[in-house]
C-alpha cells in the first residue's frame, strides 16, 4: 500500500480516516469524440434520431468500446427513474415521443403496495429497474428515491399539455391510464409532505440496506454538517433541491388536478417551510443549506450548513421568481461562480471550503455536467445569460477534452486531470465503514448526453 503522501494526485484524509486501498485502472481514452445525438440513440436503443422513443426511455449510462471490459464502468446500463426522466425532460421539445415513452414505462412499474425490501409505496416512482427479483439486499424494481416522483409529475403534465389525448393513454401492463398514474403520484407527494413534521419532502430508508440518501446525490456521505459530520440517517433528512422539484410539481400539476387549490395550498406551505428551515443568514450574504436532518438525542431539526451546488437548482424553480427575491438570486449566482465553487469543468458539487470537499470525491467535489446544465437554466431564467453560457461552455469543453460524455469530471485546479483513473478507498473510523473517495466516472452518462443534446440542438439560452 503506498503512503498517502506519495500518491499523485494527492488524497486528502479527514480526521479518523486511513488509506484502505488504491487500485490503478488501465483506462484508455477514446480516440475521437462521439456525437451527442448518436449517443442518445444508443442509450435509447434505436438507430436514428427519428426513432428516439420507440424503444422506451434512456438507460442510465454505457461504456465506450475501448473500456468495455472494465466492470467499474458498467454499473448503470439499466433504466433509472430519476435519470430517465431527467433526460426526457431535457430534450422534450426535440423528442416529445421520448417524454411519453418514459412516462409510460415508469407508470408501468408505479408502486402499488408497501414493501420495505423494495421501498415500494403506492404512487411512488421506481428508482432502479433491473431484470431480477432481488440481489440479496434490494428487491427490484427498487423505489429508494424521493425526487423521481416529482420529476414524473412534471414530465406527465408536460406531455399532457403538449398532447392532451395522452392523458387517457393506457399504461402497458396496468389497468390504468396516464391520468390515473399522475393522480397516484400526486397523492404520494401530498402524503409524504403531510407526514413530515417540518412540511418538507424528506427521506428515510425503509430497507436497512437501502440507499441512505434518496436524492440525486445518493452517496452516503453527500450530506454533512459544517464540521464534516455526516447527517443523521436514522431520522428523516430533507435535501434542498428535492424541495424545489416538489414545489414545481405541485404548481404544475394543479391545473390538471380535480382540486387545484389543494396542490397550490400545499405548495404555499412547502415554500414557507423551505424559507424557515433551509435559508442560512450569515455575514457573507447567506445561502441555502444542503438540507435538514434531526439531532439524534433530541430529535430537533438541524440545518446541514454546507455550501453545495444543490442550492443552484432553486434558481431553475418557481420558488425564487418573486421580485423581492432579486438580491437573493444575485447572491446565489455570485456564490456559485466564486473561486470556492468554480472549477475548470464548471460548478463543483461541494464548495472547496467545506470539510468534506475532495476534488475527486463522487458528490463532494467533482463537477457533474447535468448539475451544471440545470443551474445554467436557472441563471438564464433570471437574466444571467452570460453566466449561463459560460457554464454551458465549460460543460461542452470538458466533454470534448475527454472525448466522453462523462458522469462527472474532477473539481481540481485548472490543468489537472479531468478523468480519474484509479479507485481510492479510505476507512472512516468515525462512521465505521469504508468510503470510496475517488473513482472514474461512467463514460457515457445519460443526463450528460441529454444536457449536450439540449445545448447543441435546442434553442440557445
Image (cartoon, rainbow, N blue to C red):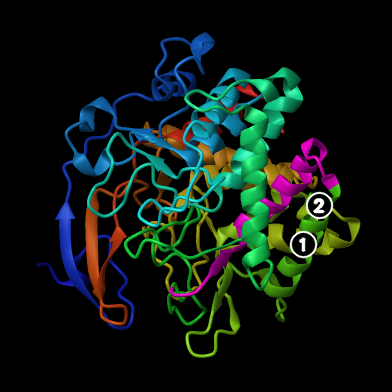
In the rendered structure, the answer to whether residue 270 lies left or right of residue 76 reads: right
Task: Residue 239: give x, y in percent of width and height.
Answer: 57, 63
Main SS class of the magenta portion in the image:
helix
Viewer-nearest residue: 193 or 330: 193
In the rendered structure, the answer to whether residue 247 lies left or right of residue 25 reads: right
Q: Quadrant of residue 91?
A: top right
For the point 59% across and 21% down, the residue is 170
- Looking at this rendering, what residue extends furthest in the left direction? 1
Residue 131 position (above or below residue 16): above
At numbered mark 2, what does the secondary structure look like: helix, strand or loop? Answer: helix
The quadrant the C terminus occupies is top right
For the point 55% across and 38% down, the residue is 86
Task: Residue 228: give x, y in percent of width and height.
Answer: 44, 78
At numbered mark 1, what does the secondary structure look like: helix, strand or loop? Answer: helix
Residue 388 position (above or below residue 332): above
The stretch in magenta equals 234-260
Q: Is residue 426 visible?
A: yes
Viewer-nearest residue: 327 or 85: 85
Disc 2 crowd, CA 10 A, few/some/many (<14, 14-19, 20+): few
The quadrant the N terminus occupies is bottom left
Is 176 one of the magenta-colored residues?
no
Viewer-nearest residue: 184 or 316: 184
Task: Residue 255: give x, y in percent of width and height.
Answer: 82, 38
For the point 65% across and 33% down, the residue is 180
Is 254 one of the magenta-colored residues?
yes
Q: Which residue is mark 2?
A: 262
For the point 34% across and 49% down, the residue is 417
Q: Quadrant of residue 458?
A: top right
Numbered label attached to residue 271: 1
Amino acid at each position: 500500500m503506498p503512503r498517502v503522501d506519495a500518491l499523485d494526485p494527492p488524497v486528502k484524509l479527514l480526521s479518523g480516516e486511513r488509506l484502505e486501498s488504491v487500485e490503478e485502472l488501465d483506462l484508455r481514452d477514446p480516440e475521437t469524440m462521439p456525437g451527442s445525438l448518436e449517443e442518445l440513440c444508443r442509450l435509447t436503443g434505436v438507430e436514428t434520431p427519428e426513432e428516439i422513443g420507440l424503444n422506451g426511455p434512456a438507460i442510465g449510462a454505457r461504456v465506450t468500446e475501448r473500456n468495455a471490459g472494465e466492470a467499474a464502468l458498467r454499473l448503470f446500463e439499466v433504466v433509472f427513474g430519476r435519470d430517465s426522466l431527467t433526460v426526457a425532460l431535457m430534450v422534450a421539445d426535440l423528442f416529445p415521443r421520448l417524454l411519453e415513452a418514459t412516462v409510460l414505462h415508469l407508470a408501468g412499474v408505479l408502486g402499488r403496495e408497501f414493501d420495505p425490501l423494495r421501498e415500494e409505496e403506492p404512487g411512488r416512482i421506481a428508482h432502479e429497474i433491473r431484470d431480477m427479483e432481488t440481489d440479496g439486499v434490494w428487491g427490484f424494481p427498487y423505489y429508494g428515491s424521493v425526487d423521481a416522483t416529482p420529476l414524473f409529475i412534471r414530465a406527465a403534465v408536460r406531455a399532457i399539455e403538449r398532447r392532451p389525448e395522452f392523458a387517457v393513454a393506457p399504461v402497458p401492463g396496468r389497468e390504468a391510464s396516464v391520468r390515473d398514474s399522475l393522480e397516484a403520484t400526486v397523492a404520494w407527494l401530498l402524503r409524504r409532505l403531510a407526514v413530515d413534521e417540518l412540511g418538507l419532502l424528506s427521506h428515510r430508508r425503509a430497507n436497512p440496506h437501502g440507499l441512505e440518501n434518496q436524492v440525486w446525490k445518493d452517496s452516503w456521505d453527500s450530506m454533512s454538517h459544517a464540521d464534516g459530520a455526516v447527517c443523521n440517517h436514522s431520522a428523516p433528512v430533507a435535501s434542498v433541491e428535492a424541495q424545489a422539484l416538489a414545489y414545481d410539481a405541485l404548481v404544475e400539476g394543479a391545473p390538471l388536478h380535480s382540486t387545484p387549490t389543494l396542490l397550490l395550498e400545499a405548495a404555499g406551505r412547502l415554500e414557507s417551510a423551505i424559507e424557515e428551515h433551509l435559508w442560512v443568514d450569515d455575514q457573507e450574504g447567506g445561502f441555502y443549506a444542503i438540507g435538514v436532518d434531526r439531532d439524534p438525542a433530541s430529535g430537533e431539526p438541524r440545518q446541514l450548513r454546507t455550501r453545495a451546488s444543490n442550492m443552484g437548482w432553486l434558481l431553475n424553480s418557481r420558488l425564487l421568481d418573486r421580485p423581492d427575491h432579486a438580491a437573493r438570486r444575485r447572491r446565489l449566482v455570485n456564490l456559485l461562480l466564486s473561486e470556492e465553487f468554480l472549477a475548470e469543468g464548471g460548478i463543483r458539487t461541494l464548495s472547496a471550503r467545506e470539510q468534506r470537499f475532495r476534488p475527486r470525491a463522487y458528490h463532494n467535489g467533482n463537477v457533474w455536467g447535468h448539475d451544471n446544465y440545470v443551474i445554467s437554466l436557472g441563471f438564464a431564467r433570471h437574466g444571467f445569460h452570460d453566466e449561463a453560457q459560460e457554464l454551458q461552455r465549460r460543460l461542452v469543453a470538458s466533454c470534448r477534452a475527454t472525448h466522453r460524455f462523462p458522469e462527472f469530471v474532477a473539481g481540481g485546479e485548472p490543468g489537472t486531470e479531468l478523468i480519474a483513473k484509479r479507485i481510492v478507498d479510505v476507512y472512516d473510523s468515525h462512521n465505521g465503514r469504508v468510503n470510496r473517495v475517488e473513482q472514474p466516472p461512467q463514460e457515457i452518462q445519460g443526463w450528460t448526453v441529454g444536457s449536450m443534446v439540449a445545448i447543441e440542438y435546442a434553442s440557445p439560452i
